[in-house]
């Protein structure tokens, strides 16, 4: 199947929204299946359980912001 340029551009422009929707769906599906999920909230790693309870697991390092094309050396 071939896709034209206009269709490809439309899909590429909507990748952030599609990814956001997919992540939210996976989050709720995991909880609905009885699994817990891990999320980062305000630099804290939190485990959320299907019953709604939450457990703080770890304080995380501050996020590093980067500009497009910027190189960052990781230790």
Image: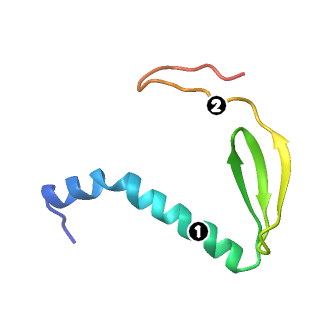
Question: Foreground residue, 1 or 43?
Answer: 43
Residue at 47% over, 20% down: 70
Q: Earlier in the sequence, mark 2 or mark 1?
A: 1
- Expressed as whole percent of the image width and height from the top left, the position of residue 30 reads 67, 72
Quadrant placement of the N terminus:
bottom left
Measured in 3D between alpha carbons, the distance from the residue under mark 2 to the one under mark 1, in whole angstroms, is 23 Å
> How many labels were placed on the picture?
2
Position of 4 compared to 12: left or right?
A: left
Q: Residue at x 76, y 42 (%)?
A: 44
- Whether 24 is drawn above or below 75: the answer is below
Residue at the location (45% across, 24% down)?
67
Q: Is residue 28 left or right of residue 44?
A: left
Observer-nearest of 23 and 41: 41
Residue wearing tag 2: 63
Taking 30 as reference, is 16 above or below it? above
Q: Quadrant of the C terminus?
A: top right
Residue 59 on image: x %, y %? 81, 38
Q: Nearer the viewer, residue 42 or 62?
A: 42
Side of 49 where 22 appears, left or right? left
Q: Where is residue 5 shown, x and y percent of the image?
A: 14, 55
In the structure shown, which secondary structural element does the residue marked by tag 2 occupy?
A: loop
The mark found on residue 26 in the picture is 1
Left-right relation of 24 to 62: left
Q: Depth check: give the residue in front, 34 or 12.
A: 34
- How is the model colour-coded? rainbow
- Number of residues whose C-alpha sits closer than 10 Å to that of mark 2, classed few (under 14), some (14–19) or many (20 or more): few
Quadrant in which residue 35 is drawn: bottom right
Tag 1's secondary structure?
Answer: helix
How far across and down, in percent of the image, does residue 28 sit?
A: 62, 72
In this view, which residue lies farthest toward the bottom? 33
Residue neighbourhood size for the residue with mark 1, other residues' Cα within 10 Å, grouped as few (<14), some (14–19), many (≥20): few
């Amino acid at each position: 199947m071939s896709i034209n340029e206009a269709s490809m551009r439309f899909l590429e422009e909507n990748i952030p929204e599609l990814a956001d929707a997919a992540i939210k769906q996976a989050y709720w599906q995991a909880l609905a299946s009885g699994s817990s999920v891990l999320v980062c909230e305000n630099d804290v790693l939190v485990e959320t359980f299907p019953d709604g309870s939450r457990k703080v697991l770890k304080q995380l390092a501050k996020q590093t912001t980067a500009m497009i094309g910027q190189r960052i050396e990781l230790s």
